[in-house]
Each structure stands twice: as structure tokens, then as C-alpha cells.
Image: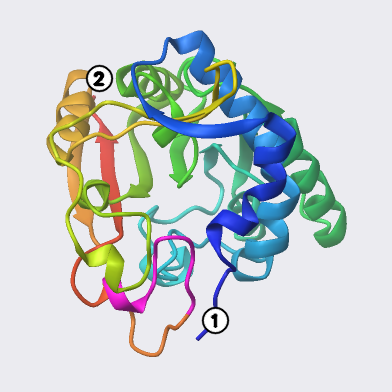
């Protein structure tokens, strides 16, 4: 079985850099949350790519730890000649794949550490989607600039307001444009962050939306993650002008043995780890 190493070990370097000493469940103001996310992903960027880079590839669009690829799923439709925005791109393998298919791809991420890996990937492949540093709550592009927006586990779990992000995505999409994004399935919130048998026991209420926060010795947030229910996502999409066309819950595929953090075949046998929301902007 392929393991991405013990998550606690993988995050040790970032936690040491940021001075993380413990965990809290508390409200976090937007400024603190954004600062924590920027610092965390800058500190963790190298370890993240050392661990997951081979799985994600240099120019491949992998939607989730289950290994669902856009080349097979075609959730974005025909991308050739389309203007496509990737939200929370990380090292931007998805945007490089899109560029290879003939799309005009633009990728943004909050983290300069992640974008450093994105630039290196562009240099290795010769595929050059535009790379921009930006906050998903304040997208620096013109109205109606894109045909499609997408995000594979990027940005959304770490922002205080889904509505702020969805409003921005709606603004930059053309009427009828697609917005497709993958996130940790909300059901996973109720289980411990453990890919083995211990991760099959419910420990957290599904309806408790209090953010998960890691803190330093002074109580400052070093990592923030938000939980939303399926209904929260649907209501936020509807309120910002989107129509949900599909909700994909990839099954764990036979023979796929890679463990990625809390994802793995033990839990994947019983319940979904990923939710992929497929939406269109209302005319």
C-alpha cells in the first residue's frame, strides 16, 4: 500500500516554522484566516510537493485523491479555445493540462510558495498558463473574462465566506459559464483525520461549523479550515447566481492503494471522500 507518510510527520516542518503548539475550535476573523493560510501554504509548499508531486504530475488534471482525472470525467466539457480560470492552483498541473488541450488558462493562488512550484512546472514542461498571486475572495480579473472556472481542492476550505468567492467567480464568468470545483466531502468532517479503522468512528457533529484552527503559543492561528454542509454549498451557489447541474461523489477505485492524509481504501470502501460540484452561471 502506498502511503504519503504520516500526516503528522509531513506537516512537522511547517508546524515548526510557524510555531504551532496546539489545536482549537473557534471563530476566526477574515484577516487572521487569510494571514494563516498564506503563512501555512508558504511553509508547507515544499513538503506538499515532495509528498504529492508524483501523483499530481506536471501537466495532469486530477480532481481528487480517488484519482479521478478530467481526461476521463470531462466535467468541464470541451476546453479547446476556452478562457479558463483555475482557483487555488497550487503548482498548477491542472492549468498546464488545460493549456495542453488548447485552452487559454489562467491560474491563481494565494501562496507564493505554491506559485514558485508552479513556475518551475511551467519551465519543465514548456506549458505556460498565466500565473497570478491572488485571494479567491478578491479575484483580480475583469467581469465576464472567462468561459469556465475550476478548482481541484483549492482555496475553498480555507476561506471564511463561500458567498464572497462564489460572487467573484460569477462576476468573472460569462453567462452560461461553468464553475466546477472539488472539496473534501462534508461527511468527512464527522470522522477523525485517520485513513485507517480509527477513522471509521464518528467523533464530530456534522452540523458544528466551528472552524478547525491550529495555533501558536500566543493563540494566533497558524492553520484554519472551514466545514460546510452539502446544503451550505448548495445555498451559497444558488444565492450567487449558479445552478447546480451535478454533484459527483467519486467512489474509491479497485486496486487504488495510495493513502493521502485521511483518504485511503479502508474508508473509501464505506463513504465518499470528495464532492465535486458542477454548476453553470445563470443567464
Between the residue at mark 2 and the residue at mark 1, the CA separation in whole angstroms equals 40 Å
**Residue 11 point in image, percent of width and height:** 62, 49
Q: Dot 2: within a 10 Å radius of its alpha carbon, few (fewer than 14), some, or many (20 or more) residues?
A: many
Contact between labelled residues 1 and 2, with CB atoms less than 8 Å apart: no
Q: Tell me which numbered mark, 2 or 1, is placed earlier along the sequence.
A: 1
Specify whether 228 is left or right of 50: left
Q: Is residue 253 above or below residue 251?
A: below
Residue 259 sits inside the magenta stretch: yes
Q: Dot 1: within a 10 Å radius of its alpha carbon, few (fewer than 14), some, or many (20 or more) residues?
A: few
Residue at mark 2: 240
Please state which of residues 230 and 93 is positioned toward the viewer in this rendering.
230
Q: Quadrant of residue 106?
A: top right
Q: Nearer the viewer, mark 2 or mark 1?
A: 1
**Residue 2, numbered label:** 1
Specify whether 16 is left or right of 106: right
Under tag 1, what secondary structure?
loop
**Residue 41 point in image, percent of width and height:** 64, 37
Amino acid at each position: 500500500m502506498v502511503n504519503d507518510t504520516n500526516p503528522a510527520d509531513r506537516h512537522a516542518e511547517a508546524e515548526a516554522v510557524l510555531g504551532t503548539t496546539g489545536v482549537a475550535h473557534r471563530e476566526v476573523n477574515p484577516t487572521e484566516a487569510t494571514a494563516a493560510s498564506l503563512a501555512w501554504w508558504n511553509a508547507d509548499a515544499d513538503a506538499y510537493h515532495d509528498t504529492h508531486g508524483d501523483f499530481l504530475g506536471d501537466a495532469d488534471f486530477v480532481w481528487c485523491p480517488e484519482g479521478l482525472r478530467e481526461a476521463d470525467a470531462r466535467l468541464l466539457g470541451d476546453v479547446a479555445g476556452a478562457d479558463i480560470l483555475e482557483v487555488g492552483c497550487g503548482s498548477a498541473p491542472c492549468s498546464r493540462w488545460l493549456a495542453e488541450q488548447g485552452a487559454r488558462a489562467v491560474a491563481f493562488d494565494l501562496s507564493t510558495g505554491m506559485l514558485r512550484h508552479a513556475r518551475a512546472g511551467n519551465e519543465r514542461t514548456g506549458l505556460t498558463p498565466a500565473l497570478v498571486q491572488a485571494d479567491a475572495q478578491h479575484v483580480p480579473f475583469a467581469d465576464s473574462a472567462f468561459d469556465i472556472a475550476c478548482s481541484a481542492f483549492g482555496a475553498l476550505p480555507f476561506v471564511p465566506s463561500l458567498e464572497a468567492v462564489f460572487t467573484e467567480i460569477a462576476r468573472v464568468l460569462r453567462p452560461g459559464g461553468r464553475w466546477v470545483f472539488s472539496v473534501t466531502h462534508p461527511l468527512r468532517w464527522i470522522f477523525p483525520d485517520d485513513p485507517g479503522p480509527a477513522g471509521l468512528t464518528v467523533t464530530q457533529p456534522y452540523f458544528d461549523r466551528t472552524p478547525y484552527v491550529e495555533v501558536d503559543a500566543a493563540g494566533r492561528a497558524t492553520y484554519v479550515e472551514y466545514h460546510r454542509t452539502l446544503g451550505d454549498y448548495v445555498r451559497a451557489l444558488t444565492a450567487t447566481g449558479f445552478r447546480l447541474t451535478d454533484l459527483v461523489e467519486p467512489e474509491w477505485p479497485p486496486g487504488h492503494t495510495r493513502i493521502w492524509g485521511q483518504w485511503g481504501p479502508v474508508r473509501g470502501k464505506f463513504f465518499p471522500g470528495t464532492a465535486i460540484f458542477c454548476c453553470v452561471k445563470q443567464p
